[in-house]
Amino acid sequence: MSTYFEDCASITTKFLRTSGFFEPGRVAHLDQKFISDGEEYDLRIVASTMEEEPLLIFKYIYQGEEKRIEIELIPRYNHLGGVGYKFKCPETGRGCYNLYFVNGEVASRYHFKLLYRSQIRSKRTKDMDKKYAIIFKAEQAREEINSPRFRKYRMGKMTKRYKRCLMAIKEAEGVSLEGVI
């Protein structure tokens, strides 16, 4: 099971709202393909806000088995009179704005205990990145300046991009890697 946010696909309430879901008294559907943790999903989403309790249905195929998950929508009334919705996680029962797909399951981040990659890096690695990131930025700036279509000047003035690259190179002049390597 993947433990990283970066590897998992998610469905958000914002995405569904911009796709035309959650309009009052309407049934909406959407077909979408996506990849989560190396697995490809053909997802069909059906949302109904006509009933007293709004409902969202996910239908997808995982390893040849067709799955159907019903997710309750929790209405959130705002001060301007509009209605927004939260998902009720099918596993934990908590309200959330994102649902993740991991190994054929749909649930919130609390169920999967998802982490960012940066959370598992050691303190020493993070310190090294902070200390020597200046050198790596300078190397990137040198590569950028030497790229074939890079413009140093425009109408007789130095470009902002060129100024940024020169500043990065100048900052890295006082730092050395001798003690590390």
Image (cartoon, rainbow, N blue to C red):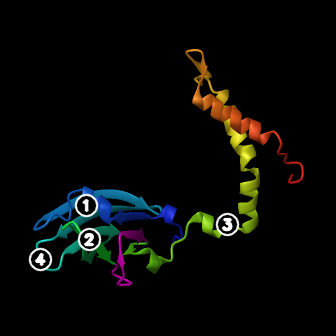
Residue 12 x/y as whole percent? 34, 64
Q: Is residue 18 rendered magenta in the image?
A: no
Q: Amino acid at mark 3?
A: Arg
Mark earlier in primary sequence (2, 3): 2
> Crowding near pointer 2: few (<14 within 10 Å), some, many (20+)?
many
Disc 2/disc 1 C-alpha distance (Å): 9 Å
Tell me the magenta residue range.
89-102
Q: Is residue 136 left or right of residue 99?
A: right
> Crowding near pointer 4: few (<14 within 10 Å), some, many (20+)?
few
Residue 1 x/y as whole percent? 51, 73
Residue 49 x/y as whole percent? 15, 71
Disc 4/disc 3 C-alpha distance (Å): 47 Å
Numbered tag placed on residue 17 in the rendering: 1
The answer to whether the residues at label 2 and label 3 have Cβ atoms under 8 Å apart is: no
Mark earlier in primary sequence (1, 3): 1
Q: To which quarter of the image does residue 73 belong?
A: bottom left
At 24% from the left and 65% from the top, the residue drawn is 45
Using the image, determine if residue 172 lies above or below residue 8. above
Q: Amino acid at mark 1?
A: Arg
Mark earlier in primary sequence (4, 2): 4
At 66% from the left and 34% from the top, the residue drawn is 165
The answer to whether the residues at label 1 and label 4 have Cβ atoms under 8 Å apart is: no
Mark earlier in primary sequence (2, 1): 1
Label 2 secondary element: strand
Disc 2/disc 3 C-alpha distance (Å): 35 Å
Q: Which residue is mark 4?
A: 51
Q: Which residue is mark 3?
A: 121
